Amino acid sequence: MLQSLSRLRHDVQDALFPPAPKLRVLTVFVTNVCNAKCAHCFYWTNLNTPTDMLSQEEYAKIAANTPDLGHLVFSGGEPTLAKNLVEVAELFITKPHQTIDMPTNGIKTDNILALVRRLVSRFPQNTITVGVSMDGLEETHDRVRGVPGNFKRCLKTIAGLTELRKEFPNLRVTTLSCIIRENAEELTRLLRFIDETTDVDYVTVEPLREQKMDQTLLAPTVDQVRMVHDLAMEINFARLKRMRPHEATIILSSLEELYSVQQNFFGTGELAVRCQAGSVSAVLEPNGDVRCCELRGITESVRNYDFSIPKLLATAKAEQERVEILAGKCACTHCINIGQSIRFERKTALERVWRQKYMAWRMFHSPAA
């Protein structure tokens, strides 16, 4: 009893008085090469274009100047096409609490499995999450991704990753789905299909962003977002209770709060949190350019600041970016930015603690699936 009360007091204090924002999450666009043509891609103008890539020596300097990262996200482009991904990870990941996230389009199954095997075997103490993108059932997914046969390759990749997970318990396998107005209804069928036919740890969904290659795509309605979120949470509750009971509470409560903010945005057009992009998170381009957020413009090149991202983020230009972001000059539903910003919202701190405790209670008292 005393231990539980002490833990509750610690959680409340941590929520009410979070540490000052500092760079914790770095998204590394490790390549701009991609073998898909996704209709909803926000990065499409940068894909498959000549660029002055950072060298391994330059990455080493950047990593040496970024000592306190908690979370490394590899993106692109298709990150699994980067030949130096594991070597870059070795520079940034030096402590067991650090985690790695990586999305993949699932197209080149053998290449993906070989790279992930190298990654999880190199970092056995670090949790590594690989998310396979799936945006509909076969016909819809292949059309949205611009690659015939992509859906079947995704299933093959998921099967290979979940088999690999038996050998490497630090691996987590998820799916990533983009909610678009035209695919929202179908996503409910896709999520049930994934739940019934695969062994992923959990599913994730993300609403369509304003920046996209195909301008005819429409953002989902708030009712569509809520419908897909509710089903994803239902599936995830059952799967995580069964597969990851010790991680379930934090994952589910974090997803629930993220989804609440996203639903509010689609219902009101307003972002209910103060986005901390450029403070707790930043984006590194393949050529060394840095963005406060992947959806905003280039701030500066890290090459001009002694390969120090913290030094670059301390400039007047970066500060102006943060001022504009905090003032709501941009607003979106970016899962990384929102997820990292929520913990700095003191006005919802007690609600956040309650959400985690209630989720833990539900985990303990709900019947087994």
Image: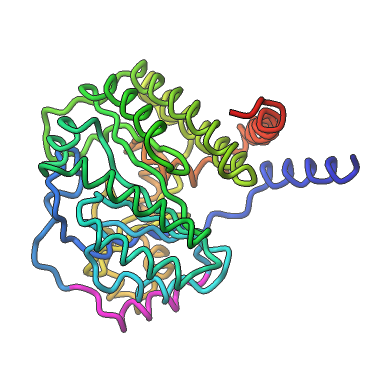
Percent x, y for residue 78?
A: 23, 57
- Residue extending furthest bottom? 57
Residue for point 40% across, 63% down: 313
Report which quarter residue 85 is drawn in.
bottom left
**Above or below, 144 relative to 127:** above
Regarding residue 279, the answer to whether it shows in the image is: no
Percent x, y for residue 123?
A: 48, 70
Instruction: From the viewer's perspective, tell me whether residue 235 is left or right of residue 138.
Output: right
Residue for point 52% across, 36% down: 239
Report which quarter residue 186 is drawn in.
top left
**Image label count:** 0
Q: Main secondary structure of the magenta part?
A: helix
Instruction: From the viewer's perspective, tell me whether residue 35 is left or right of residue 54.
Output: left
Percent x, y for residue 147?
A: 11, 44
Residue for point 90% across, 43% down: 2
Residue for point 24% across, 49% down: 105
Regarding residue 92, the answer to whether it shows in the image is: yes
